[in-house]
């Protein structure tokens, strides 16, 4: 399925794959690197996901559905933004262990255009940088 323009970002984290996986699905860790968002899900295929928080000074509540869980290597979910201009996206996160590091590749489809793709990539890069800081013990900068 190739819907819209594809955003793609990657980061290498100096942590074992299991630790990176846990950071993807643990609400307390997610809150530390995902812009303070509260995430509610049991991370089982077919289950709902709810993201709540504040973005650019405004409260939001986004919803989605877990599509694929192949612990600790693949997480795929649908995401629908809660605002009036919200678009539905498929977010795919692949983890690959490489020695004592884990490569994280995140792909988001259905970006309306290149400008939207660049904005998505900027946001995902910021989030993954926060995850990297958290897992590598550097602390997360508040953004």
Image: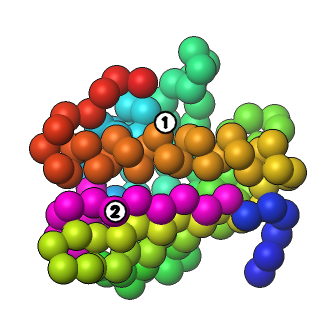
Residue 66 visible at all: no
Within the image, what quadrant is residue 142 found in?
top left
| Percent of width and height locating residue 8 | 61, 62
> What residue lies at 34% left-to-right and 79% top-to-bottom?
96
| Percent of width and height locating residue 103 | 36, 70
Question: Mark 1 falls on what kind of element?
Answer: strand
Kindly indicate whether the residue at mark 1 contacts the one at mark 2 (C-beta within 8 angstroms): no
| Percent of width and height locating residue 102 | 28, 70
Mark in front: 2 vs 1: 2
Question: What residue is shown with label 2?
Answer: 12
Number of residues whose C-alpha sits closer than 10 Å to that of mark 1, classed few (under 14), some (14–19) or many (20 or more): some
> What residue lies at 54% left-to-right and 59% top-to-bottom?
9
* The disc label shown at residue 77, or none: none
From the image, which quarter does the N terminus lie in? bottom right
In this rendering, is residue 18 above or below 51? below
Question: Mark 2 falls on what kind of element?
Answer: strand
> What residue lies at 26% left-to-right and 79% top-to-bottom?
98
* Front residue (pair 128, 33): 128
| Percent of width and height locating residue 92 | 55, 70
Within the image, what quadrant is residue 122 found in?
top right
Left or right: residue 67 compared with residue 14: right
Q: Which callout, 2 or 1, points at the residue further toward the start of the chain? A: 2
* The disc label shown at residue 52, or none: 1
Magenta region, residue range:
7-23
In this rendering, is residue 39 above or below 107? above
Number of residues whose C-alpha sits closer than 10 Å to that of mark 2, classed few (under 14), some (14–19) or many (20 or more): some
């Amino acid at each position: 399925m190739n819907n819209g323009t594809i955003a793609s970002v990657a980061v290498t984290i100096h942590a074992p794959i299991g630790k990176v996986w846990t950071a993807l699905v643990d609400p307390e860790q997610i809150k530390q690197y995902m812009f303070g968002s509260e995430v509610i899900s049991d991370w089982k295929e077919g289950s709902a996901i709810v993201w709540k928080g504040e973005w650019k000074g405004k409260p939001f509540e986004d919803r989605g559905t877990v599509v694929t869980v192949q612990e600790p290597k693949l997480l795929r979910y649908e995401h629908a933004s809660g605002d009036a201009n919200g678009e539905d996206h498929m977010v795919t996160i692949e983890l690959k262990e490489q020695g004592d590091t884990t490569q994280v590749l995140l792909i988001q489809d259905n970006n309306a255009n290149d400008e939207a793709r660049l904005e998505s990539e900027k946001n995902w890069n910021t989030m993954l940088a926060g995850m990297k800081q958290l897992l590598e013990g550097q602390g997360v900068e508040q953004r």
